[in-house]
């Protein structure tokens, strides 16, 4: 029978914080109750998510995960990122909550992920995309980047992703800019997620210095994303 819909229920420790987060993503609240338990529904187009407030939920140990298939991941990512920058004053790319930009990951279709304030993963994929097909498999450092992204962006293991990436960078020292620059930009992002901001800043500074004018133009989007991920210099305490 046509017309069926599935609405996932995601647990969050603070319903008000969750509603504010989803509002920043452009969702509107269509239902809320306080008793017998805090509960709400948020919707954006045909995406409907149910949020259940549960005291004691630890976002860091959440196993919540939802796959959302959409017509255009790049357009949706841009809208989400703009809303989060407005709400947070920066692009939250480390910790909880965070947003991870669209990137090809080994063994999966291309897409991006959002981790909400409850630690729930929303994995967005474009309708019609498929996993790697015969003859399209990347090689060299580009393949290393996809393997690292599988660890960091799909599994949330940033330390393992950085290890994979660093070993690949050492192994493919002769890789050209088309492969090396995206790998180093992802390294900046991973270092920020792991709390190693000064090192990330050094990597980005060295990368910029090594690019000629044509390279700076070619990788402008990636460089700008890395700058946003790095964010402003902290005013108190270590970076």
Image (tube, rainbow, N blue to C red):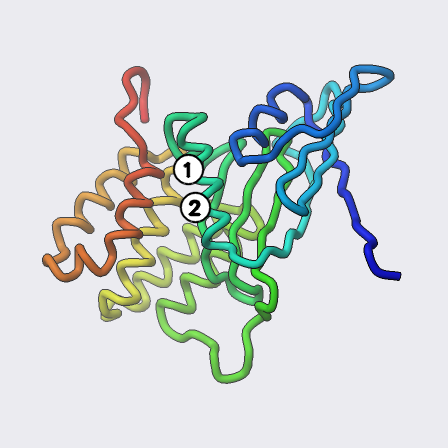
Can you say whether 107 is above or below 193 in the image?
below
Residue 205 is left or right of residue 11, and the answer is left
User: Residue 152: image x %, image y %?
Assistant: 50, 50
Instruction: Say few, some or many: other residues with alpha carbon within 10 Å of mark 1 (under 14 / 14 to 19 / 20 or more).
Output: some
Vertical side of 56 occupied by 206: above or below = below
Q: Residue at x 38, y 26 (%)?
A: 89
Looking at this view, is 87 or 215 the one in front? 87
Q: Which residue is mark 1?
A: 82
Residue 168 falls in image quadrant: bottom left
Is 135 left or right of 8, judged from the image as shown?
Answer: left
Q: CA distance from mark 2 to mark 1?
A: 6 Å
**So how many labels did they put on this image?**
2
- The image shows residue 222 at horizontal and vertical percentages of 30, 52
User: In the figure, is residue 35 to the left or right of 22?
Assistant: right
Residue 78's mark?
Answer: 2
The answer to whether marks 2 and 1 mark residues whose Cβ atoms lie closer than 8 Å is yes
Q: At x 62% / y 34%, what residue is drawn? A: 119
Q: What is the secondary structure assignment of the residue under circle 2?
A: helix
Question: What residue sits 41% from the left and 61% below the top?
Answer: 145
In-front residue for pair 54/74: 74
* Quadrant the N terminus occupies: bottom right
Front in this rendered view, residue 127 or 12 = 127
């Amino acid at each position: 029978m046509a017309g069926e819909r599935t609405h996932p229920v995601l647990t969050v420790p603070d319903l008000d914080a969750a509603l504010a987060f989803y509002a920043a993503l452009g969702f509107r609240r269509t239902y809320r109750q306080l008793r017998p338990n805090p509960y709400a529904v948020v919707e954006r187009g045909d995406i409907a998510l149910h949020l259940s407030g549960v005291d004691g939920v630890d976002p860091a140990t959440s196993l919540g995960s939802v796959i959302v298939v959409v017509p255009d991941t790049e357009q949706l990512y841009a809208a989400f990122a703009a809303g989060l920058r407005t709400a947070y004053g920066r692009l939250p790319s480390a910790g909880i909550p965070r947003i991870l930009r669209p990137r090809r990951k080994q063994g999966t279709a291309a897409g991006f992920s959002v981790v909400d304030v409850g630690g729930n993963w929303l994995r967005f994929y474009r309708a019609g995309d498929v996993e790697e097909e015969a003859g399209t498999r990347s090689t060299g450092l580009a393949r290393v980047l996809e393997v690292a992204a599988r660890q960091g962006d799909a599994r949330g293991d940033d330390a393992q992703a950085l290890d994979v990436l660093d070993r690949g960078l050492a192994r493919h020292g002769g890789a050209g800019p088309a492969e090396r620059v995206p790998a180093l930009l992802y390294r900046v992002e991973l270092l920020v997620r792991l709390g190693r901001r000064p090192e990330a800043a050094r990597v980005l500074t060295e990368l910029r210095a090594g690019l000629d004018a044509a390279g700076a133009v070619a990788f402008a989007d990636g460089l700008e994303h890395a700058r946003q991920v790095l964010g402003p210099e902290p005013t108190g305490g270590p970076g």
